[in-house]
Image (cartoon, rainbow, N blue to C red):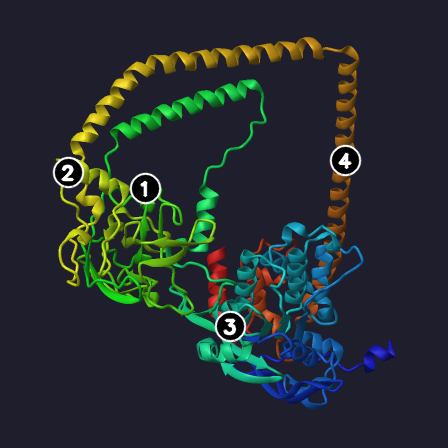
Amino acid sequence: MIGSILRNPIRKPRATAPGDVVLSVRDVSVDFGERTVLEGLDLDIRAGEVLALVGPNGAGKSTLINVITADVDARSGTVEIDGLPSYAWTNTELAMRRAVLLQQVDIAFPFSVEEVVDMGRAPWQQVSERDRDDLITAGAMRRTDIDRFADRHYPSLSGGERARAALARVLAQTASVMLLDEPTAAMDIKHQEMVLDLVRSYASTGCAVVIIVHNLDLAAAYADRIALLSRGRIVADGPPADVLTAELITQVYEHPVHILEDPITGSPIVVPKRTPSRPLPTGPLDPRRRRAERMTATTPTASRFSLAHSAASIVAALALALGALLAGVTASPAHAAGQVTISGQPAADAQSEIQVSGSGFQSVQGGFGGIYVLFGWVDDPNGGSWKPSAGGVTGEDYRYVYDDETNPVGYQLFAAFPGGSTSYAANGGEVAADGTWSGTLRIPGAVFQTYDRDQNATSVDCTTVQCGIITIGAHGVKNTNNESFTPLTFAGGEAAVAPQAEASAQQPQAAAPAAPAEQPGDAAPVATSAPVGTTTQSTGASQGLGAAGEALAWLVVLAPVLLLVGLTVVALAVGIGAYLAAKSLLLGVNPAALEKVRGQRERKALQEREKQRRKTAAVRLSQEQREARARRRLGAVGAQQALSQVPAGPAPLENDKLVDFFAMDAPSPRHPSPLDDPRADAGGEERDAPTLILSSATGRREDAR
């Protein structure tokens, strides 16, 4: 009794205004053996602010947190909290002023999640805030999305769930400074964003938050200030846009990066520059596109079902074949709308450059991607089967010269859509609104090396096959209006003629070849008005009609046969299925087997009922325990009301604004609280002035009601 009388009163946190320095670090240096981890570090932490500590591994971020919490002794320097050195406060007073979340929190004893969160209220047991525990504990669990785990044992949670439970415990501590060491390391994207948004809301109540993150995008999106550490020193401290620059991040992290801008929030986005492990083709043969094509490709699978399912598959295959036949008869060949003009003739035995331009192409204002202009070969220069929109595959139906993205030579042109997000990468300008573009393309010669579909090196000899200029949609976008093939003639020689072109040339009614290789002259610029596909389209019109008529005649003959075969297969499938069903019924009726199955089902039902009974008893016991704790807490309400009439010092930070924070988006308190009594504010005594976002927090609370 005498000890409690002589004990010094607990000094509650003082009220602060936005921007006040609540914690400062001055000239702190830390050594681990002979290695210096922190050297002369100065840092101010201000109320109402989220400060993100970023930097490479070993920069000293966690050590700085440990110095602030006095878990690591500094060689020199001081840490001041609330205007006094940290050693001037008792442990309880320090716990009221700063809360710490370590990288990993291990609790071996089977405490429930609610009990772990309620541990955060321990510093407030000896002051008049204890009656608010229910509201704060429930709000902390609700806002960290763990309220549904309240009765589960903490060791049974997953890594991400444990991290959120530990964060809820730190929130329930309602300290004026929150120190978080990688709180999102074990969380998925949803909960990472939820935690950072929660931290942002907590800081808006006037508290200060220091968070260590390795995700620079999260730091840029949610932090007011970023302190960038490198080798024990702060190399930059300021707003995210001033700290996260390409030059500074590249220097500190020793890896080149791009800095983009979020189109919605405007915050910086850090994108590392990546180099493939081996030279990979760019453009249409992008690895991401190949993965997507492999995922969507159809692969045959072995049947694992009965003969009835196999017969049904045969019927479906026949139907698909019939549909494909009809589609082949009625479909009309597609042609590209764009036209390519070539100026100059490349050399066959050396690298050279030509001028290419296009007209009639489709331009999309603000669209993604654009047009790739490539030099290569197609297997069907007079038709359109090679086109990506018609199912053409890169490396099989068409091949082209690749360019190294990290050190481009100019073998590929990329004309971007105007105003698109990929305009920065265009080396061929933009596709104008009228569908025109132009640029310079480098030709390696008549023989070039490329890759097949499996990325095996192969060579293409343009003296034996027809080569030319290929245009296709960029970044995997398939657009038939922007797909074309224009033959190209090398100086001092003639381009090879594809087999289809030779066949067309031998017909007396065929049009003259569109390839400029057969024109007289040796070095004059070559200009083509349309791709080969469009030139030969009208040539075979009559032959197409004749083929269509012949296919229709065959269809009339084969239709009855296919129908008869289909009906026979269906009847066979039904008969086999009925036979198997009857066989299973006749051979499977065994009294002993039936009795065994009946006994197994009864035992399983008994086990389920016993399991449900135990679960119900556990829930009832947990509910009784919660009600008992609630009754004990209600007993303290009367004492709190009596103490409220005694004059007290300045109101602690936990009043009003933090209570509003935990009341937002949280269920109604499980037990009545004097905070919800409208008469509590009716007295003449005026509370301390609110801090940063009290008015907006109160407004959100009223909206939530």
Q: CA distance from mark 3 to mark 1?
A: 49 Å
Query: Which amino acid lies under the numbered mark 2 shown in the image of this protein?
Result: Ala
Q: Give SS at disc 4.
A: helix
Q: Is residue 199 above or below residue 468?
A: below
Residue identified by numbered label 3: 223
Work out whether mark 3 precedes mark 1 in sequence or the reverse, and give the earlier one: 3
Q: CA distance from mark 4 to mark 2?
A: 84 Å
Q: Residues within 10 Å of mark 2 (few under 14, many from 20)?
A: some
Q: x, y percentage for residue 47? A: 55, 78
Q: CA distance from mark 1 to mark 4?
A: 60 Å
Q: Nearer the viewer, residue 48 or 384?
A: 384
Q: Which of the labelled discs sits on residue 510, or is there none?
A: 2
Q: Nearer the viewer, residue 402 or 64?
A: 402
Q: Which of the labelled discs sits on residue 611, or is there none?
A: 4
Q: Which of the labelled discs sits on residue 390, or is there none?
A: 1
Q: Is residue 583 above or below residue 257?
A: above
- Give the mark count: 4
Q: CA distance from mark 3 to mark 4?
A: 49 Å
Can you tell which of label 1 and label 4 is closer to the viewer? 1
